[in-house]
Structures are given as structure tokens and as C-alpha cells.
Image (cartoon, grey):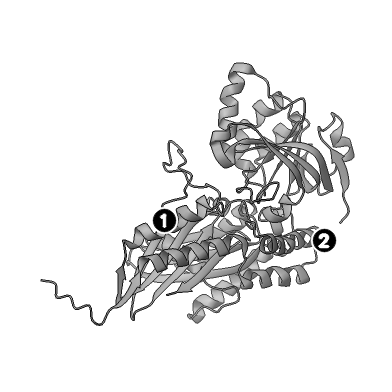
Amino acid sequence: MKGTTIETPFKDNILKSLSIGALVKIKGIIVTARDASLKRLKEDMKKKKKLSFINETNVLYFCGPAPTPKGKVIGSCGPTTSARMEEYFEILFRSGVKGLIGKGPLSKEATSLCKKFNVVYLIVTGGAGAYLSSFVKTKDVISYKDLGPEAILKLEVDELPCIVASMKGNTIFK
Amino acid sequence: MVNSTKENLRRVSVKVVENAIYEGIVNITHKLPEDIKKALKDSYESEVNPKAKYILNQLISNYDIALKERIPLCQDTGSIILFIEVGQDVYFTDGYILSGINKAIARATTDKYLRSSIVHDPITRKNNHDNTPAVIHIEYARGNRVKLYIMAKGAGAENVSVSRMLPLSYASKDKIKDFILKWVTEHAAKACPPVIVGIGIGGTYDYCPVLAKKALLRKIGSKNKNSYYDKLEKELLSEINKSNIGPQGIGGKTTSLGVFIESHPCHIASLPVSINITCNSSRITKIVI
């Protein structure tokens, strides 16, 4: 399957070039987040109301990598279940997030919310963390280092293979 | 009074068990069992949905890369669960067996083979970053061997597992099948399909989910010794794969690689049923000492 390459940050008209089920390859900066970091991010945003990374990227990846082996850029780094993060969607979307990468279906409410804010939800293959690590070129901790695997990381990815799973209120899931 | 004669007992050093568990954990983090590899390859061959095929191909690349580069198959290196059969003629020496098991896990974490995936307290979510303690099921067996099954289980699939005390009106093949099918098809997409389904039927409120987990220890393609349950397993697998959930939930006929049932006698008033789902990265190893 051939896919089109799209760069981050996603542009406002990103949805025009996408369709459900399409293969896309992400190039550029993405930021990891998951349960513990999103909980803390939400608290911090109540105070500062701005995402520190939003000027650099508007694409979040629900992921908590395994430790980085010696000589590697990153350890195994597949997606975690996106539905668990839904409670943070609105605050993230209001702060400018335009793309989410994760795995598994979203609720109807979350799918509608993505539609409302013109957000695209992409999936990468759960269980393919070793394979997916080969698309990561650099890794830096942005914040919450104490959370270990749940820290917020900035990743530079090259042609990370994703499938368009939800946008404009539609979904790929059966 | 206890009359202990140790002459007939086989001495097994806890250090030996600890090292074996350490090796086992390290192995399963980056080495997918052969039966799962074969099942993924076979599914790739038989799958007709191009996107499903694309995903299965990634999973095949994944196990090759993980093995070659010695990096975990999945970033969720999981909860470490052990089923241990201890021969009654075994006598453990050089320490306390449960401490030895947990030391092995902590060591595998320190040596960076495991992600710190375990919070010490479920409410405060404090993470001690050592992945201990393991969940351990110990049973006695005849003889003087120690048989260890080590499972590294991801949370995505564990989170969509279930136990129910069903009404006795469900005590028919069709009704049980409907209950299992409905649950699995509604939840499999979140569990990194193609999934493997472990089912416990019978026992008690506490034992039924243990049966479901134990069912997952079976190899893909293995037959159930009970022909009634063997047939039920095959029917369930076929029905689940007709659901068109597919790999990662995006469609296709590869939703499950295997369905395994463990049954146990139960009370005249009860029908416990548990479903324990596991993901495509089913990491299990067996070690005999």
C-alpha cells in the first residue's frame, strides 16, 4: 500500500487531502502523551492555558515507550488505547491540537468532537512497537520526566505509517 | 507434629528459579512464541482485505525486528503473571521463592528490558519503577519438577476482559456462545486484534477468571481435551472471525488467532463465565526446572 506523506504541524485544511482508510506517512515533529501526563497537562493548562509545544507541532501520539536500548534512538514505541484519553480531547482541541495518533475506536461523542474541531484521528499498529521505533529519528523529553514512560516526549518521525481512522464524523471501525 | 524427612526431596535453589525467570522474561519481551508467529503468517496468507494484510505484514516485520535488534515486541512489556506447578517432592533452598521471583522482575526492569508499567498503588498511581510484585498462581503437582509459565500481558486487552455470574438460563451451548460472541465482538477492537480469547467456565467467583487466564497458556492450534469444548472453541473462533472486525479493528477476517476454554465443576446454583482477551503480542514462555 502506498501512502501520501504529510508533514507536521498539520495545516488547517489538512482534512481536504485525507479520506477514511487512507494510508498516510507522517513526517516531522509529534509529541507523546498518555494517561498520567495528560492528567498533569490538564492541571497545568488551567494555570497557563497554552501547550508549550503547540507552535512546533499540533499532533499528539498516545504512546509510552519502553526504555531506550544502548545505541538506539528510542525503545519499542507503539500506540496505546486512544479511548482512554477522550476526557482530555476538548481541552487539547481548544488549545490547537489538530491530529491524534493512537489505536482502537473512539466513542461517538469523541468522534463528534473531532468533527467539531476539524481534527483527524490516525491509527498506527498496536503490537508493532519495535517496527514503529524504526521511524523515529530523534527523541527529547519535553516535560514530566519523573513520569518515566509517561513523560511528554518530542519525537521527530520520518514516514511514520498511519491509517486515517476518524474524521468529519466518520470512522473506519466496524 | 510434622515429620519431615528430606531424603526424598529434590532440592531446588531459589537462585536457579530466579535466574530462569529472569531469562524467561528477557526472552519473551523480544521473542514472539513460534505458534503466534505461525498464526500471524498463516493469517497473512489467507487474509484478503488489503489493509488487514498490510497490518499483519507490519506485525510480521515487528517480530523480526524485535528479535534481530533485541528490543521489546511491544512497549507495553506488561504485567508479569506466573503460573507455577510445584512438584510436591521439591524442597526450595537458598531463600524465599516469592522474593526470588520478584527479584527477577526487578532485575529485568533495572536492566531496561521492561518498561515500568506497574503502579504500586492502584488509587494513588505511584510508580516504583520496578514492576513488582508479579501476579502468581501456584499449584501442586506430583513429582519433583518446577514448571513455570511466564506471561507478559499488555493492559489494552486486559482492560476489556470480563467476569460474570450468569443466570442458569445461560447453561446451554447457544446461550453461552451468544454471551461470549457479543462481548468479544464489542470489545476486540480495543485489544490490539488479532486477539486470543481465553474463557473460563465454572468454578467460583474468584476462580473463574483464573481459568480464563490459564486457558491462554495453550498453544495456537492445540485441541481441547474435552471434545464438547473443543467444538465450542472452533465454532467461536469461526464466528468471531466472521465479524469483520479484523486486525486493529479496521476490517478483515483475522480478528482472532485462537479461542481456548478451561472449565471447572461449579455449584448447582451458579454459572460463572470469564473472558480474558490477549493481544496479538501474546508473550508466554514455559520453563521446567
Task: Please give the name of the residue rendered at 35% of the width and 69% of the height, measured from the top-left corner.
Answer: B13
Residue B48 placement (x, y as % from top left): 80, 66
Q: Quadrant of the N terminus of chain B?
A: bottom left
Q: In 3D space, how far apart are the residues under numbered discs 2 and 1 (Cα atoms)?
A: 45 Å
Residue B148 placement (x, y as % from top left): 44, 69
Say whether residue A115 is left or right of residue A88. Answer: right
Q: Say which amino acid is labelled 1.
A: Lys
Q: Which residue is mark 1?
A: B103
| Circles 2, 1 touching at the beta carbon (< 8 Å) | no
Asked whether the viewer can see residue B21, the reply is yes
Which residue is most to the top? A47
Crowd around label 2: few <14 · some 14–19 · many ≥20 (10 Å)? few
Residue A15 placement (x, y as % from top left): 84, 36
Tell me the number on the disc at residue B50.
Answer: 2
Which chain is indicated by disc 2? B
Q: Name the N-terminal-most of marks 2 and 1.
A: 2
Between residue A103 and residue A114, name the one nearer to us.
Answer: A103
